Image (cartoon, rainbow, N blue to C red):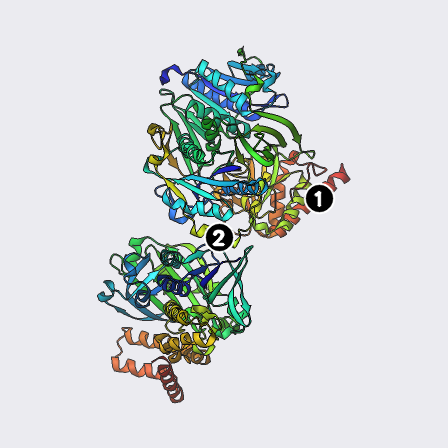
Amino acid sequence: MAEKFDVIVVGAGPAGTACAYTLAKQGVSVLLLERGEYPGSKNVMGGVLYRKMMEDVIPGFYKEAPVERPIVEQRFMMLDKESATTFSYKGMEWGKEPYNNFTVLRAKFDQWFADKAVEQGALLINETVALECIVKDGKVVGVRTDRPEGDIYADVVVLADGVNSLLAKSLGFHKEFKPDEVALAVMEVLKLDKKVIEDRFNLEGDQGCTIEIFGDSTKGILGTAWLYTNKDSLNIGVGTMLSGLIKHKLKPYELLEYVKTHPMIRPYIQGTEQQEYLAHLIPEGGYRSMPKIVGDGVLVVGDAAQMVNAIHREGSNMAMTSGVIAAETIIEAQSTGDFSEKALDVYRQRLMYSFVGEDLKKYKDATHHFEKYPHYFEQYIPMINRAASQMFTVDGTSKREKQRKIWQGIGTVGDKIKIARDLFQAWRVMK
Amino acid sequence: MLHIVACIKQVPDTKIIKMNPKTNTMDRSSAPAILNPYDAHAVEEAVRLKARYGGKVSVVTMGPPPAVKAIRKCIEIGADEGYLITDRAFAGADTLATSYSLTKAIEKIGTMEPIDLIICGKMTIDGDTGQVGPGIARRLDIPPLTSVNKVVELDREVGYAVVHRKLEDGYEVIQTTLPCLLSVEKEINEIPYSTLPNMMRAARYQPVIWSVEDLGIVDRTKLGLKGSPTIVAKVWPPDKPKGGEMLQGSSEEQVNRLFSILMNKKELFHKSGATEEGGVQ
Amino acid sequence: MNIEEYCGIWVFLEHKDGAIVPVSLELLGAGRRLADKRGVPLSGILIGDGVKGLAAEAITYGAETVYVYDDPIFYHYRTESYMRAVIACVEKYKPEIFLYGATSTGKDLASAVATDLATGLTADTTMLDVDAETGLLEASRPAFGGNIMATILCKKDRPQMATVRPKVVKALERDPERTGEVIEEPVELREEDIRTKVLDIVRHTVKKVRLDEADIIVAGGKGLGGRAGFEMIGEFAKRIGASVGGSRDAVEAGWIEHSRQVGQTGVTVTPKIYFAIGISGAIQHLVGMQNSGLIIAINKDSNAAIFQACHYGIVGDAFEIVPMLTEAFDQALREEVEHG
């Protein structure tokens, strides 16, 4: 007779592990299934971990977790072909407890996090693929894995199997994603001496820095590039909407190569050695493409629920919060023994009230907005760079004259009105 | 009941290990620790014999505490029990000291339940020696049989086994008394995908862990660095090849150039072609 | 142990089909060099049934003394019987260095002997030297999948033992003028003391290729993409009378059998011509073929490490280059037939 657990969590990424950890801590019997060789082995993330949401799961985690560097500076770079306008914030308050964010290597961090869940009593099984949910009388009662004697049962199954959740799909919770609902991120880890990183990025000791890069880094396609500092490596990547890549007939790694050789980026990564290359789909559709996330005996969390905020690239913290809320919902449901869709719907409701739902709602139009108006990237960023160049080039022209020229450079009156309208809309979307 | 002990080792995956070019040391973090691939076949063979004749499979390893992971991998394959001997005193052991320590552990396992057969992998991928298995057999004074690629039959009651030992151009059929020790080739079996119940048992499994004190009467001068006659005097990177001449031009030009180079060694080429069957399986 | 009592270099003389195997002759060459450096004698130990005649052969290759155990009990190699003869002989004559070929027999025997003598044994040595003064054997070998080379010493125990890979050292020219002594040792073993019996020996009917004896090897790697790629190089190999080999990746992918694996965990080869096709040149592969006479590499990736290890390289698609090369040989063959 196959074993039965209270809960099976499919996928040991941040969402699944946060869920399993929370459940196990309350004494719930939980099986955590991971398809990779170990948790994190199949993961790629921009590399930023948000302290607040992680601390909701494990207070003071940063004292022992394998984090790379606390981020003390965030830079934003608007890139044109041969120029960049950068603004940044650096604050020493981020360099000490309780910190703000950290860079992490998912391969290390996820493994550590899953080990914590195991310490709490979760049973972690690696290298095992969940093929489908076992459904009985319309209710999910377990999971069929790819292993011999591989059926396993539970009161509730939590799907945390990533953006292309096969299990959610097989339950009819969502259809195949449309290209404009998913982003493709490609990323490389580049080895670089610790000391060189600190000199090059103007950092002291363990401090870290992130650079978000907009504009020419994606050749005008909606998306961003990024460059993060790890302990002794850099994390460089570019994420764009799949639809944009298809339209521009670009291969993702071509785009990454373009970023790496860009004259504004190149100096940062000089002398590095490529360690790893990874590609990953990220749901970017936001609130509008969120699939059904609750069913009889089943909950969907994390990327599998399209839980990503396309604008702020905060996938993993939302994922964690969704995992925790799912766990709390299940624990409450255990008191009544009712795991029906109706009882578990508390999860969806709470999620929508949490910052996750609020943020997703708030930015729900953002992706689609920028998708509709590619000139944000194609025109405005070059424009800003031209303006900055004119402003700062010392050529004997007065500041007043420079401003006049900049204003002229923006174009006709009609253009100016259009820009004003676009910027206003962008502000409405983002605020 | 047939009791088989498999000797295993956790090793860095040398296939992907990176070297620190400055210090000539291995960057151990670059290579995950895995169950020595040859040992996986040893455990699988033990599990198959258990399926054939009934009985029990124990695995034993010497290593640091994380080697528990390698034992769990054996439980996934179907082993019943695992023993880890771990102690600072074992550190720095060469093959002679390793075979001594493992023998002590095997003797102790044997006092709890007599052992009929010991199976080892052909060699480890980090040490590449294949010396520990025969060493254990000598210390236990049982016949060592290396290069085994088939176990034909085994009779615990009468106390014999028949196995095939691989030769360069065939195999020999050997009859041996039991208990004995087999070092097995990878080709002896294929390791199937483990069942989910085995995976769950492995995830929960806590092996027996022994230190030197737990092994009974042990001659400490035979352990670890102290008990190792060989020492590594120096390590250096293999000679860097210098690089050859890259042929230039179109594919056709390159092939023509290569062909004329090869024609300087014309006498080597058979005019009439093949002398052997093709290499494809 | 008084290591001063130990003197002389020994080689285990492995034999097959009535002849001493090449690696043992190579070791006599290496042993001669070590013995001369040390100013000590070089001896061989020969065990078998009806093998006494081979002792003279060993002497023509450099041995000064050959100890012979000739008895029906040694008809087949068995660890227990051979080991006892070797141990008895070592205890009687006390050599300081004892070399074995790193063959399956040599490794099996040396491992057992080292345990009983409680002495150091270095496996799969590829370089040998000796300190003329101290007599310390410097046995060097690739370790950790060929990622590093390590020199191993055995300071306090004797004999210092090593198994040595075939084809890494050179045999001396055979010289019938060399003289030496053959000493027959008494055999005190009884069959009933031996716990193993060889019931049968089965030779493969199709003569298996000996990659290490091939003059030309065409080896393929991951870049060939599958069995079709190996069929292609197989065709080429057939045309030029070469043997087919493969990299570890290709073997693990099941495109070619393990016995044809070239490299650290496969065979070491030294053909006159080695073609590396679609092989990236991982260090563990290079250690197995770097002493080949002429190395030709074909690979798509111009950065592949194999180009650092070859004599001539072609950056290109094997599926284009190899058939062209095959055709070039075909044509040459046709012309030869027509003209000659």
Q: Is residue C68 or residue A36 the one in the foreground?
A: A36
Q: Quadrant of the C terminus of chain C?
A: top right
Query: Percent from the top left, x then y, of residue C106?
Result: 52, 27
For residue C168, above or below residue C45: below
- Return the residue at label 1: C330
Mark 1 nearby-residue class (10 Å; few <14, some 14–19, many ≥20): some
Tag 2, which secondary structure?
Answer: helix
Amino acid bearing label 2: Met
* Subunit of label 2: B
Q: Is residue A200 or residue A39 the one in the foreground?
A: A39
Q: Is residue A327 or residue A269 the one in the foreground?
A: A327
Q: Residue at x 36, y 78 (%)?
A: A353
- The residue at the far right in this view is C338
* Subunit of label 1: C
Mark 2 nearby-residue class (10 Å; few <14, some 14–19, many ≥20): many
- Return the residue at label 2: B199
